Image: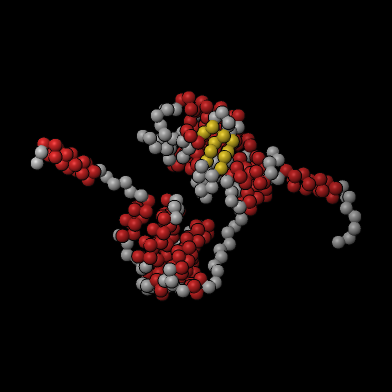
């Protein structure tokens, strides 16, 4: 063997050793399948195929985790009920699982989300001819309370803004308040998402429904962002970064918001970070923005979701009510009913 061949073989050997010692990067599906491998569940192999199917469809990690947990709990419940084969599952098992979840105190919205995940899994099994279509011959509907979005009172917004310390926190809160972005979207921003000259933020992929959109920067939000950009570490990848080169995590962002609520004396009002998004929508409707425009800014696929804000605050409806009531109170209505 020549000296050159010996050196080459040594390099290959060293490179292989380095690669072997490096930790493998786990994808979300790897993490889920690793957890599944340690479980004893009926229809375990079908759940694995379903999760791989969702991964191939490019579902978000949070969606994968939610589907896995819901279906896993359902299969575990069926196993404890004596059903070891997926072919034995009937609609009554699904109805019993829903009652079980409600009995253990789960919120109706959580149960409804779990139900949607399980039904999607069962539809997958039907398409694979694993179970018959009669399993879902009757639709199961859970009625959710149609609650109003919770917006912050304008006076409370002013109190909150008056106590915020530091350019980063002020930029983050004003960005959420003036653009209606979800906090996950704001924390995931990189510099290429920002168009300071055009006063725009490009959300190439929405957090919740993967629908991209453009939002705009108000004067105060733009000023706060510029101030933070001058102070931030230019070597960091994310606009709002945490330790290392990672983005600021949700729990850290939320804890800062809670801190400022307490400082402003607003901790008893039940406000959450998401209330900033609700406040954004409510204020724009009050200022006369059309519902269709607001829908695009919020990134809602269904305008009925946006229409909830019209129920929360509508100056036109309010003015019509008091105009009509003034006539009634003056005795201006004649006739018998």
Q: Quadrant of the N terminus?
A: top left
Q: Position of residue 211 (x, y in %)?
A: 54, 47
Q: Is 199 on the left or on the right of 5, as rendered?
A: right
Q: What is the image's colouring? A: secondary structure
**Front residue of 130 and 146:** 130
**Front residue of 75 and 298:** 298
**Front residue of 260 and 301:** 301
Q: Position of residue 141 (x, y in %)?
A: 56, 65
Q: Quadrant of the C terminus?
A: bottom right
Q: Position of residue 321 (x, y in %)?
A: 78, 48
Q: Please say whether residue 212 is visible from this viewpoint.
A: yes
Query: Residue at the spot x=47%, y=33% of the render?
Result: 191
Q: Position of residue 144 (x, y in %)?
A: 58, 59
Query: Residue at the spot x=51%, y=25% of the render?
Result: 227
Query: Residue at the spot x=45%, y=65% of the render?
Result: 124
Q: Please say whether residue 152 is visible from this viewpoint.
A: no
Q: Residue furthest left?
A: 1
Above or below, comparing residue 209 to residue 47 in the picture: above
Above or below, comparing residue 158 to residue 67 in the picture: above
Please count the marks in the image: 0
Q: Is 10 on the left or on the right of 238, as rendered?
A: left
Q: Quadrant of residue 10?
A: top left
Query: Residue at the spot x=70%, y=45% of the render?
Result: 314
Q: Residue furthest right?
A: 334
Above or below, comparing residue 195 to residue 291 in the picture: above
């Amino acid at each position: 063997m020549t000296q050159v061949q010996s050196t080459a073989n040594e390099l290959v050997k060293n490179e292989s050793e380095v690669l072997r010692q490096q930790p493998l990067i786990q994808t979300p599906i790897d993490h889920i399948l690793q957890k599944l491998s340690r479980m004893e569940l009926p229809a375990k192999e079908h759940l694995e195929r379903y999760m791989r199917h969702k991964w191939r469809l490019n579902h978000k990690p949070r969606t994968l985790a939610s589907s896995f947990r819901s279906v896993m709990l359902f299969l575990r419940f069926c196993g404890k009920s004596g059903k070891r084969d997926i072919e034995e599952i009937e609609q009554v098992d699904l109805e019993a699982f829903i009652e079980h979840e409600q009995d253990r105190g789960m919120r109706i919205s959580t149960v409804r989300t779990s139900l949607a995940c399980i039904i999607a899994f069962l539809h997958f099994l039907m398409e694979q001819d694993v179970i018959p279509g009669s399993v879902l011959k009757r639709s199961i509907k859970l009625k959710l309370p149609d609650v109003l979005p919770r917006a912050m009172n304008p006076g409370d917004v002013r109190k909150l803004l008056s106590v915020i310390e530091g350019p980063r926190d002020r930029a983050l809160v004003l960005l959420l308040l003036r653009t209606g972005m979800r906090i996950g979207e704001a924390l995931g921003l990189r510099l290429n998402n920002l168009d300071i000259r055009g006063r725009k933020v490009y959300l190439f992929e929405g957090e919740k429904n993967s629908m991209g959109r453009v939002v705009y920067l108000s004067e105060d939000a733009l000023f706060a962002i510029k101030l933070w950009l001058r102070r931030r570490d230019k070597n960091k990848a994310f606009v709002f970064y945490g330790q290392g080169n990672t983005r600021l995590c949700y729990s850290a962002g939320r804890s800062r918001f809670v801190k400022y609520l307490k400082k402003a004396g607003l901790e008893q009002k039940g406000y959450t970070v998401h209330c900033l998004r609700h406040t954004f929508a409510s204020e724009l409707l009050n200022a006369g923005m059309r519902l269709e425009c607001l829908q695009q800014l919020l990134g809602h696929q269904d305008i009925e979701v946006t229409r909830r804000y019209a129920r929360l605050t509508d100056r036109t409806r309010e003015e019509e009510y008091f105009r009509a009531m003034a006539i009634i109170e003056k005795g201006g209505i004649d006739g018998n009913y």
